[in-house]
Image (cartoon, grey):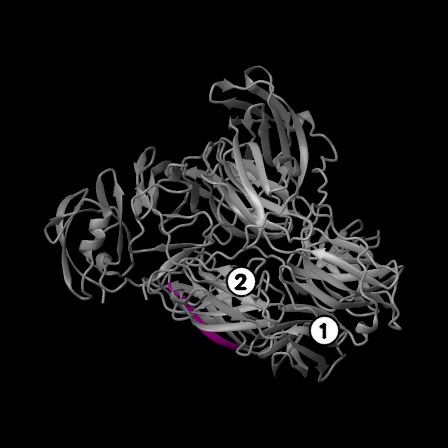
């Protein structure tokens, strides 16, 4: 099979051959069966339900206005005629997520431009969104950063003439209009990539209502891409992503029927409870109702996953497990039984054991969204939170500390699960130097630290005259550190692990910049129907860049000098694939521009629908596409509200995939899936129930443990990371009502470090009991990656434990090539190593309890040359064709060809562009080819034998 190299953007920058995984989202689940006796209750009476449009509060302001001595933005607003006086400018500061889905922004200031279109807005260091409005114009928005130590940051906002979007709301699949639908249009700031998120600031959204015929109009919009959300009573909310405005035709928004959750709240004796508050969480905001005299409730919700709980006085209750409801579906017979108080309790302390008072703890449904409970720690660090029985994710935040998320904590009926949290102080520091390619210091360069913690608040500093910089008071943990020249938009980044109280040094060498520009057309040669995205991937490095073309398909990208592979894709394409043999390469020169025209890639895709066991669509199901062979990759996609999914385009002739669909324990499988078979149907089978207990052969019984499910061979389940496969239990027993019906390995780790595992086979819809015997403590695995050529240490190699390549690795090798995987359970494990643009190397290792196992040296190498090629790529540089890259130990490299050599002719035929170079150097494997090459020392002929 001819391999393509996928690109992972904005996550693991050092991995050039890994698929991009989407952000964790709420996942649907199966409804529980109605409780016995439920049918004897009277019909549910809806008392209150969510309005069609959520009443979104305005963005909260900063607690204190920015002090003048902290510096300011100097904003200049212009249009096509020049400066704009009287324009209204707003600044929003990103303060970070809190794990509840609440807005991570604060209003930081606003004002009107004066003479010259200028406004000075006081603003402290941080990341901002700036917006400007003026009569007759569409609003303009720009993401901007105020670095630490910079007195004033100049920003120009360019207004354009307002445009109009027209459309209509209809019943999905029919032309029947939906009148009086509420519509919200939210802009995408920055480059609107497939993984981009529209701004959630209500002040920056546009709102309107469709008329009696379903028609609607938005006016005075800025050209660009938007997310359009429509909602109406009796219908589920529908969002169209990456909608281009203006557009050639009206947009039609099809609405599915609303979903409904109906049931009863009863007490411990089974008697109905009136005036109980019922809450459904899991969407962007909870939906609430109050039970009637007969204890009945009805909640109108959007299609998706919901967690239903109820409370009356101090008695809580919850429907077991999450509920998955399809568009227009009604789940009846739900019963919430109220019982004794339950919840979470524990303490918050620092790593040295000192109590942390004032920490804020927030509980959300495990794998879902929405705040279900909140507590604050007392002066002695203790806290308590009342919650009904269920599974929860708990975020913990405290001033001056590194935040933490404790995932999938299980609360039992009538009990308080202990959760003791230790937080590390935010006392990590970064420092280093930034120099140019000649080693000269760069003054005024920006250096940025972006933590991978849930808050995600970045810090930015400027280099001094010696190129030195420093950032203090940072959170501990994995952090992306990047640098860019003054005035540049492109970052050079790397991933570091910061430690509390320690200083990590990171130096950067930044090449001079150039640019590439060109025209994107369709394969037919015709113009684009909408702007496309152009992506540039550096050969042999990290720091990919993306930009959107204009309406006519023109693009320009600023890039550090080097060799790049370019591809143009539709904006909705969720992942980027690059074909080494055909996607064009270009050499970007320092200080100048080079042209490279592109053809839009629009390959066939594999699509289909996921259905529940009952045959209704399975909303927001996870679909894992598994590629085997010597490059094992698992790519996860999310189905939409109607269960429909689309996988990214692949090379024509690619091998079939195995598909696994998952929705809260309900699993469906399909082997041999291929684009020619689309659309496909994947039907889920019912979840199983797994009960068990953890037993100790010696020592004290466990008083709490972490349980994890794996494939029977120990590999990670395909949906791991998108739906919880790990849960935390109190005591020594466990119950999993949403286990997948298949063979599983169950592993546990107790609070005191003991581990255990057991094998179990579950049937869909069945149940089983299992005992997990405890053995000894956790182990570790270490090793070293070395290059196949020369045997030297291989830094920056991604290391994956018990899972296919894809997403976030467990570790990267250091400069000495070494890696260490700590906190590993005893048993058999699979370790995979992936060098940048290289082949996956797999090792199987068995570790005993408390053992430090070492796999020794693992030889890694770049991807082999494709048979029939030279193991080389070509770029176009100012009218010349040059070698852009060479596969180490490939045919061209062995023959003495160097990167940068110009290719004049192949077998006596003059080469005029990279396409001709590509086609003429290809041939039968093992056959010779004569190259006429020009380099600094003159011209020469090189004989190369094509790869076999």
Boundaries of the magenta span: 839-846
Q: Position of residue 630 (x, y in %)?
A: 38, 69
Residue 802 seen in render: no
Q: Is residue 840 located in the magenta-colored stretch of the structure?
A: yes
Q: Quadrant of the C terminus?
A: bottom left
Relative to 117, residue 415 above or below: below
> In the image, is residue 506 above or below residue 593?
below
Label 2: few (<14), some or many (≥20) within 10 Å? some
Task: Judge whether residue 809 is colored magenta.
Answer: no
Q: Tell me if 646 is positioned left or right of 52 in this view.
A: left
Say whether marks 1 and 2 touch (CB < 8 Å).
no
Which residue is farthest left? 908
Question: Measured from the top left, where is residue 665 in percent x and y?
Answer: 62, 71
Q: Residues within 10 Å of mark 1 (few under 14, many from 20)?
A: few
Residue 677 x, y percent position in the rendering: 41, 67
* Mark drawn on residue 810: 2
* Whether residue 749 is situated above or below residue 345 in the rendered picture: below
Q: Secondary structure at mark 2?
A: loop
Residue 92 is at least partly visible in this image = yes
Q: Main secondary structure of the magenta part?
A: strand
Q: Residue at x 75, y 63 (%)?
A: 262
For the N terminus, the image quarter is bottom left
Identify the residue position indicated by label 1 in the image. 33
Residue 294 rendering spot, x and y as whole percentages: 87, 64
Q: Is residue 777 left or right of residue 589?
A: right
Is 533 on the left-hand or right-hand side of 584?
Answer: right
For the residues labelled 1 and 2, the Cα–Cα distance comes to 39 Å
* Residue 444 or residue 93, whichever sits in front: 93
Q: Residue furthest bottom?
A: 697
Quarter where residue 344 is shown: bottom right
Would you identify the image quadrant in which residue 410 lies?
Answer: bottom right
Give the camera-side residue of 863 and 669. 669
């Amino acid at each position: 099979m001819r391999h393509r190299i996928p690109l992972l953007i904005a996550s693991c920058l050092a991995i050039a051959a890994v698929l991009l995984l989407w952000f964790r989202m709420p996942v649907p689940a199966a409804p529980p069966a109605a409780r016995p006796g439920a049918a004897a209750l009277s019909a549910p009476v809806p008392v209150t339900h969510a309005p069609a449009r959520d009443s979104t509060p305005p963005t909260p302001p900063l607690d204190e206005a920015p002090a003048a001595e902290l510096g300011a933005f100097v904003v200049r607003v212009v249009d096509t005629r020049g400066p704009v006086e009287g324009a209204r400018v707003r600044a929003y500061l990103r303060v970070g997520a809190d794990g509840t889905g609440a807005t991570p922004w604060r209003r930081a200031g606003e004002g009107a431009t004066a003479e010259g279109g200028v406004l000075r807005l006081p603003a402290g260091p941080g990341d901002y969104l700036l917006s400007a409005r003026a009569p007759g114009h569409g609003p303009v928005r720009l993401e901007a950063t105020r670095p630490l130590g910079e007195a004033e940051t100049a920003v120009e906002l360019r207004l354009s003439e307002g445009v109009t979007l027209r459309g209509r709301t209809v019943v999905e699949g029919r032309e029947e209009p939906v009148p009086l639908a509420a519509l919200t249009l939210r802009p995408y700031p920055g480059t609107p990539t497939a993984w981009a998120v529209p701004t959630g600031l209500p002040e920056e959204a546009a709102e309107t209502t469709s008329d009696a015929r379903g028609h609607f109009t938005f006016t005075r919009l800025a050209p660009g891409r938007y997310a359009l959300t429509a909602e109406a009573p009796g219908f589920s909310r529908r969002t169209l992503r990456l909608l281009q405005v203006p557009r050639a035709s009206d947009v039609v928004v099809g609405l599915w029927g609303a979903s409904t959750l109906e049931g009863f709240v009863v007490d411990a004796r089974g008697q109905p409870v009136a005036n109980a508050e019922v809450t459904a969480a899991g969407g962007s905001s909870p939906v609430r109702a109050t039970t009637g005299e007969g204890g009945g409730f009805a909640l109108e919700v959007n299609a998706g996953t919901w967690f239903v709980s109820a409370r009356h006085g101090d008695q809580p209750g919850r429907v077991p497990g999450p509920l998955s409801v399809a568009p227009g579906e009604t789940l009846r017979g739900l019963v919430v039984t109220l019982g004794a108080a339950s919840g979470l309790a524990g303490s918050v302390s620092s790593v040295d054991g000192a109590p942390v008072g004032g920490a804020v703890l927030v509980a959300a449904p495990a794998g879902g969204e929405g705040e279900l409970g909140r507590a604050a720690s007392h002066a002695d660090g203790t806290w308590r939170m009342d919650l009904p029985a269920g599974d929860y994710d708990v975020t913990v935040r405290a001033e001056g500390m590194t935040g933490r998320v404790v995932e999938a904590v299980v609360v039992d009926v009538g009990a308080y699960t202990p959760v003791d949290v230790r937080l590390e102080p935010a006392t990590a520091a970064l420092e280093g130097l930034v120099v140019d390619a000649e080693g000269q210091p760069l003054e005024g360069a920006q250096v940025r630290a972006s933590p991978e913690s849930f808050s995600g608040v970045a810090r930015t500093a400027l280099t001094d005259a010696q190129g030195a910089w420093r950032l203090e008071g940072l959170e501990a943990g994995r952090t992306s550190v990047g640098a860019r020249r003054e005035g540049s938009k492109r970052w050079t980044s790397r991933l570091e692990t910061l430690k509390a109280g320690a200083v990590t040094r990171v130096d950067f060498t930044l090449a001079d910049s150039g640019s590439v520009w060109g025209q994107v057309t369709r394969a037919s040669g015709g113009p684009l129907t909408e702007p496309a995205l152009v992506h540039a991937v550096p050969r042999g490095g990290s720091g990919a860049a993306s930009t959107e073309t204009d309406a006519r398909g023109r693009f320009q990208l600023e890039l550090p000098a080097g060799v790049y592979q370019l591809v143009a894709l539709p904006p909705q394409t969720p992942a980027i694939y690059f074909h080494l043999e055909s996607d064009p390469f270009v050499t970007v020169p320092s200080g100048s521009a080079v042209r490279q025209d592109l053809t839009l890639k629009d390959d066939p895709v594999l699509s289909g629908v996921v259905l529940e066991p009952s045959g209704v669509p399975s909303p927001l199901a996870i679909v894992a596409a598994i590629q085997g062979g010597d490059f094992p990759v698992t790519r996860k996609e999310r189905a939409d509200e109607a269960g429909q999914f689309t996988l990214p385009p692949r090379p024509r002739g690619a091998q079939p995939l195995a598909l696994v669909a998952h929705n809260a324990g309900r699993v469906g499988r399909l082997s041999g899936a291929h684009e020619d078979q689309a659309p496909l149907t994947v039907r889920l089978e019912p979840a199983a129930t797994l009960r068990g207990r953890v037993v100790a052969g010696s020592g004290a019984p466990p008083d709490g443990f972490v349980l994890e499910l794996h494939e029977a061979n120990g590999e990670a389940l395909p949906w791991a990371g998108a739906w919880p496969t790990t849960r935390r239990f109190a005591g020594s027993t466990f119950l999993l009502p949403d286990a997948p019906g298949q063979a599983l390995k169950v592993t546990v780790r107790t609070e005191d470090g003991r581990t255990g595992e057991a094998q179990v086979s579950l049937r869909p819809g069945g149940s089983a009991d299992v005992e997990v015997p405890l053995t000894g403590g956790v182990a570790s695995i270490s090793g070293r990656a070395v290059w196949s050529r020369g045997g030297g240490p291989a830094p920056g190699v991604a290391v994956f434990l018990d899972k296919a390549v894809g997403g976030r690795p467990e570790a990267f090798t250091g400069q000495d090539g070494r890696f260490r995987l700590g906190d590993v359970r005893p048993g058999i494990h699979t370790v995979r190593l992936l060098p940048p643009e290289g082949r996956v190397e797999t090792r199987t290792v068995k570790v005993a309890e408390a053992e430090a196992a070492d796999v020794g040296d693992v030889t890694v190498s770049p991807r082999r040359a494709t048979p029939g090629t030279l193991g080389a790529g070509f770029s176009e540089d100012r009218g010349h064709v040059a070698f852009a890259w060479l596969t180490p130990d490939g045919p061209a490299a062995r023959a003495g060809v160097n990167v940068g050599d110009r290719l004049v002719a192949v077998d006596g035929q003059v080469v005029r562009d990279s396409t001709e170079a590509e086609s003429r150097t290809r041939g039968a494997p093992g056959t010779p080819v004569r190259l006429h090459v020009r380099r600094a020392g003159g011209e020469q002929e090189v004989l190369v034998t094509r790869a076999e």
